[in-house]
Image (cartoon, rainbow, N blue to C red):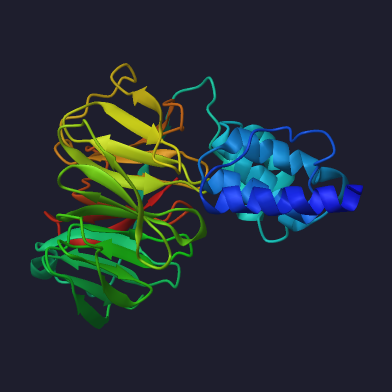
Amino acid sequence: MTRLKMITVSAVLLLGLLARGEVPLFPPPPGQRLATQQALAAGRSALVAGNPEAAYRYALMARAEMEAEEEWNRLTATILIALDRPTEAIRYLARVEGERERVELLLGRRAGSGPAASLLPLNQRWPRLSKDGLKEVEAVIPARDGTLWLMVEDRLVQVSARGEQMGFTTLQGASDLTLDVDGDILAVGSSHMFRKGRIVRLPAGIRRGVSITETLQGRMIVLDETPALHRIDPEGKVEGRRTLSLSRPLRVRADGSGRLFLVDRSKDTVEVFSAALVPLRTVDLSDMEVSFRRPENLYVDFAGNFLIHDGSRREIHVFTAQGTRLASSRKENVRIDAVGWDGLHGLLFLDRKNGYVGRIQW
């Protein structure tokens, strides 16, 4: 068999395995080295399957011919984040046009030896919102288009930058409001989810939606009340499920590499899973000089830094993916009854007592 035929056969076999979620071991047998684009595709598939170690090795196979390409550099940076190597990811992300903001955030959100930063409110309030109307609001989120979204019982409300209500969407049993990977609104209710401007029924087998997030290549992760995590493919079919041993799981979020972060209301811990719903580690927050009374919400940025809202203390705290505290608010400076974060610079809070939505600087 010629070398070309061996490469072709091995590529076909590999793609078949990837289609079934069975990523092969690295390195491949002698004489079966993948072509550059096939190695790149295998790297992406390995990352989606929750195997960043294999993904990194496939990326290295494509390095010689693609090191100058943005596609390869973006994938390599994403893989390094999944491997808990965000500092190394900076050099690759810096080669990608349009990623300056994320490079700066990676640089700024590295754990240092000094104290955690203070999260302080800006003198900015969303205009024309009524105090009485905000009493019913359970969640807020800043959309990438500059609008504000509010979650009220059984509906989502969109508000313009001038404070004008632009419309609302009915969502029975609305329980979670966040953003998808494109910065569009993503929400879940008892039996439906709101995605890309549409209401979609949750797949059979999900008893009641509690929280939702989007991971790589359009995969949706839904936390239901059983409790369990459900992995839904772009066509809306459940392709994976994991029963949880946690007593009161509250929120699930994904970072830019596909890792999942889950907070339990009854514990000072954050559980981290791979994109394939495999447990990776438990981040213990009990020794971080922070005592959580009642976790209410969780957000995660593209690099795995996560924000927790303590609803009882009305404070927020930001940690690295490994659990080092980066920043905190104090209730004497700002009262936070609800918080919304786009993972970048958009950090909003709701103060129900004083009746306004404001911004926090970090």
User: Where 203 falls versus 304 (above or below)?
Assistant: below
Q: Picture quarter containing residue 328?
A: top left
Q: Quick one: 293 or 128, which is closer to the camera? A: 293
Residue reaching furthest front? Answer: 1
Question: How many circles with numbers are drawn on the protein?
Answer: 0
Residue 79 point in image, percent of width and height: 62, 41
Q: Picture quarter containing residue 155?
A: bottom left
Residue reaching furthest right? Answer: 2
Q: Picture quarter containing residue 80?
A: top right
Q: Quick one: 247 or 127, which is closer to the camera? A: 247
User: The C terminus is located in which quarter?
Assistant: top left
- On the picture, is 39 further left or further right than 304? right
Residue reaching furthest top? Answer: 287
Report whether residue 226 is seen: yes
Identity of the residue drawn at 52% across and 42% down: 303
Identity of the residue drawn at 21% across and 77% down: 169
Residue 218 point in image, percent of width and height: 46, 61
User: Where 133 falls versus 48 (above or below)?
Assistant: below
- On the picture, is 90 further left or further right than 314? right
Residue 149 point in image, percent of width and height: 29, 68
Identity of the residue drawn at 15% across and 44% down: 226
Report whether residue 297 is seen: no
Identity of the residue drawn at 12% across and 63% down: 173
